């Protein structure tokens, strides 16, 4: 939540920062703003998207070789020009941007108000900034020292960038809980919430750690801890290119990312899934095989779409490994007093690797002695680093706020893990192990087939786009896909949609069914097939409109449904990887037809770094 960009060097800062903010807009788009120092400190900010800010700025006014910019996902204070970052301190000298939440800001605000400070916004950020100013003036110390003192007093999460009109050669940055990457160029430095604004200038980056302060000049980067001790920056080479983060001819990132799935899953399986050798190579699993196969329980911890991947994995792990699995919303798990026993394994699932609830849940579980295995997309992210072991999904940069290719990458990794553990444990036969490996290997080709002709999906989207509610039903491995289909529709098209286990529908949701309610059945050929046929009949008998995701060649379900989306045949364990694809496309097309910004749905953000 909230994207942060900074630049200091020989270039004009404004174009670098604006371009960077556009790349980070997926993190929030309630307002955007930029602060530059030329002779004086100048701040431009605007409610709305980065393009609105750009439009409001006169290009003649934006000189300066140092700049910081922010794209906001509102927490404290409504989206408005006034609450947009950067904020300026009371003496007009310091400007700051912030991603995170300062929990004890009310108390500090009261203290400052008693001293005569006034506030232009409702944000916690402006409070922190003035707190820093106050400390600096009272102690007559450097800005860096004032920041250090302030950070020791505050409770919460932050990534901040701070500039001082009187020192246009320095950006001071600090992080705890919210991400910060610094790109190292020749005579210039770039700062950002992720590497996407940096990639076209340099591939050398430093991921700043929690409780570190960075003092960044054009040709110098100094990292310190809160005790003022110098830290050695650990330079990493970025494994990402510009093409990955551009639309590549597609109208939207979401559509591009849906179409990238044959490739992203192929990349995820490459070098790991070796059916001809009967081997799955995953070092994170291999090195911890004992712990994993002897786990007394596996707890999947995640949020949103990643939580749905955990639900699919529950079915897969219990079937293939015979280990009891629980799937937890990270936000619930972290605040109760969960029982974690010796022998429990936590599998953390996260695209961004920065989701605050998931991260804190893991920290707590780790403190209690749990073994943490991370299934993460973003390399070097906080969850990847806090995990004891893990496997990256290698899905590439996902920019569309609604997760698509990252989800199928998570499923592919989790299925490979279950296969490897189950085979080593002896809970699946060699024959089934080899057959499932082959089925998994053929997924990229089968997704390609689904994506070859999507006219039917578009026509169905057009037919149902004006419905007010949708029901999504599935059983077994496809039950979580019904939940995911409903979530995608809600996120992208703002249509109310509920996902339910198909049989459970009789205990409530069936009361909603009439001739106006589209009911999406995820009903591929699997061991629940006969049962779901009966459920379809129950809906038809009440005049509901049935849209089915069915297996190619099936005639029974398509014979009953009003409309059918076909997917190729595969094993039921692999089926979720295919059945989710038409549902992603259905919500995409409905959203586009309704005229919504599908890449940046209202109120959402891709990386939720607040609780
Ligand atoms: C946000 C995104 C979702 C995502 C969820 C969890 O809500 O909009 O698409 O599934 O966060 O994010 P993570 O990065 O942990 O997978």
Image (cartoon, rainbow, N blue to C red):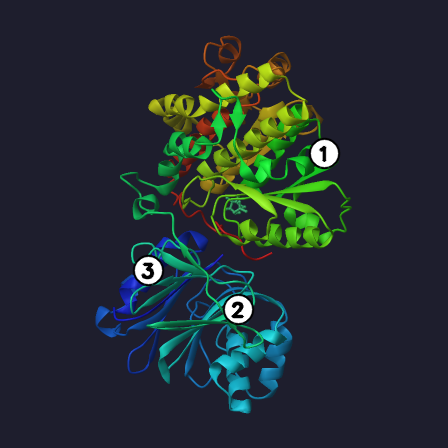
Residue corresponding to mark 2: 212
Residue corresponding to mark 1: 294
Please tell me whether mark 1 sits on a helix, a strand or a loop.
Answer: loop
Please tell me whether mark 2 sits on a helix, a strand or a loop.
Answer: strand
Q: Residue 609's x, y, as percent? A: 54, 56
Nearest to the eye among marks 3 and 2: give it. Answer: 2
Q: Residue 96's x, y, as percent? A: 45, 73
Cα distance, mark 3 to mark 1? 55 Å
Q: Which mark is residue 409?
A: none
Q: Residue 530's x, y, as percent? A: 62, 11
The reply to whether discs 3 and 2 touch (Cβ–Cβ < 8 Å) is no
Q: In this view, does 70 lie to the left or right of 425?
A: left
The quarter of the displayed image where residue 480 is located: top right
Seen as rendered, the residue at the extreme left is 60
Q: Is residue 130 left or right of residue 388?
A: left
Q: Residues within 10 Å of mark 3 (few under 14, many from 20)?
A: some
Along the polypeptide, which appears first: circle 3 or circle 1?
3
The quarter of the displayed image where residue 517 is located: top right
Residue corresponding to mark 3: 52
Q: Residue at x 44, y 27 (%)?
A: 582
Q: Residue at x 51, y 39 (%)?
A: 490
Cα distance, mark 3 to mark 2? 34 Å
Q: Nearer the viewer, residue 374 or 289?
A: 289
Along the polypeptide, which appears first: circle 2 or circle 1?
2
Q: Residue at x 62, y 27 (%)?
A: 316
In the displayed structure, 352 sits above or below 571; it is below
Cα distance, mark 2 to mark 1? 38 Å
Q: How crowded is mark 2: few (under 14 residues within 10 Å), some or many (20 or more)?
A: many
Residue 247 appears in view = yes
Q: How crowded is mark 1: few (under 14 residues within 10 Å), some or many (20 or more)?
A: some
């Amino acid at each position: 939540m909230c994207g942060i960009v900074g630049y200091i060097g020989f270039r004009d800062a404004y174009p670098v920062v604006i371009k960077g903010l556009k790349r980070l807009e997926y993190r929030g788009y309630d307002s955007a703003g930029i602060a530059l120092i030329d002779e004086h400190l100048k701040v431009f900010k605007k409610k709305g998207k980065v393009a609105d800010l750009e439009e409001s700025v006169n290009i003649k006014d934006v000189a300066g070789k140092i700049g910081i910019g922010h794209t906001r996902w509102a927490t404290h204070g409504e989206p408005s020009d006034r609450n947009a970052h950067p904020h300026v301190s009371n003496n007009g000298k310091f400007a700051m941007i912030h991603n995170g939440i300062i929990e004890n800001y009310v108390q500090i605000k009261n203290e400052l108000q008693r001293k005569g400070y006034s506030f232009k916004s409702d944000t916690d950020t402006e409070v922190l900034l003035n707190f820093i100013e106050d400390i600096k003036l009272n102690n007559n110390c450097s800005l860096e020292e004032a920041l250090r003192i302030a950070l020791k007093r505050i409770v919460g999460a932050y990534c901040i960038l701070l500039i001082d009109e009187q020192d246009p050669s320095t950006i001071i940055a600090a992080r705890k809980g919210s991400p910060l990457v610094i790109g190292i160029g020749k005579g210039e430095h770039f700062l950002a919430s992720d590497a996407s604004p940096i990639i076209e200038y340099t591939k050398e980056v430093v991921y700043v750690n929690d409780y570190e302060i960075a003092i960044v000049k054009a040709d110098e980067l100094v990292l310190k801890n809160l005790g003022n001790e110098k830290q050695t920056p650990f330079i990493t080479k970025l494994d990402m290119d510009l093409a990955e983060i551009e639309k590549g001819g597609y109208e939207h990132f979401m559509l591009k990312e849906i179409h990238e799935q044959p490739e992203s899953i192929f990349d995820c399986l490459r070098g790991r899934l070796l059916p001809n050798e009967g081997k799955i190579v995953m070092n994170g699993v291999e090195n911890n095989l004992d712990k994993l196969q002897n786990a007394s329980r596996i707890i999947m911890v995640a949020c949103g779409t990643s939580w749905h991947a955990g639900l699919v994995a529950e079915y897969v792990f219990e079937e293939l490994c015979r280990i009891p699995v629980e799937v937890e919303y990270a936000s619930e798990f972290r605040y109760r007093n969960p029982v974690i026993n010796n022998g429990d394994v936590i599998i953390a699932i996260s695209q961004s690797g920065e989701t605050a609830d998931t991260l804190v849940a893991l920290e707590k579980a780790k403190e209690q002695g749990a073994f943490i295995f991370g299934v993460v997309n973003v390399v070097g992210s906080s969850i990847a680093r806090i995990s004891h072991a893990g496997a990256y999904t290698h899905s590439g940069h996902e920019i569309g706020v609604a997760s698509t290719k990252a989800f199928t990458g998570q499923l592919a990794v989790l299925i490979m893990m279950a296969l490897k553990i189950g085979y080593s444990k002896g809970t699946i036969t060699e024959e089934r192990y080899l057959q499932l490996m082959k089925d998994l290997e053929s997924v990229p080709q089968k997704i390609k087939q689904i994506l070859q002709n999507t006219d039917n999906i578009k026509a169905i989207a057009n037919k149902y786009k004006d419905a007010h509610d949708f029901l999504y039903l599935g059983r077994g491995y496809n039950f979580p896909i019904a939940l995911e289909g409903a979530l995608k529709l809600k996120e992208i098209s703002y249509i109310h949609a509920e996902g339910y286990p198909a049989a459970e529908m009789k205990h409530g949701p069936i009361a909603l069914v009439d001739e106006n309610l589209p009911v999406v059945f995820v009903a591929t050929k699997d061991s629940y097939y006969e049962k779901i046929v009966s459920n379809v009949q129950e809906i038809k008998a009440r005049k509901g409109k049935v849209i089915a995701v069915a297996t190619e060649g099936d005639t029974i379900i398509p014979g009953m449904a009003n409309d059918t989306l076909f997917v190729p045949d595969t094993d039921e364990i692999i089926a979720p990887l295919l059945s989710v694809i038409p549902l992603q496309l259905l919500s995409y097309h409905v959203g586009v037809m309704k005229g919504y910004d599908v890449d940046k749905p209202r109120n959402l953000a891709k990386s939720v770094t607040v609780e």
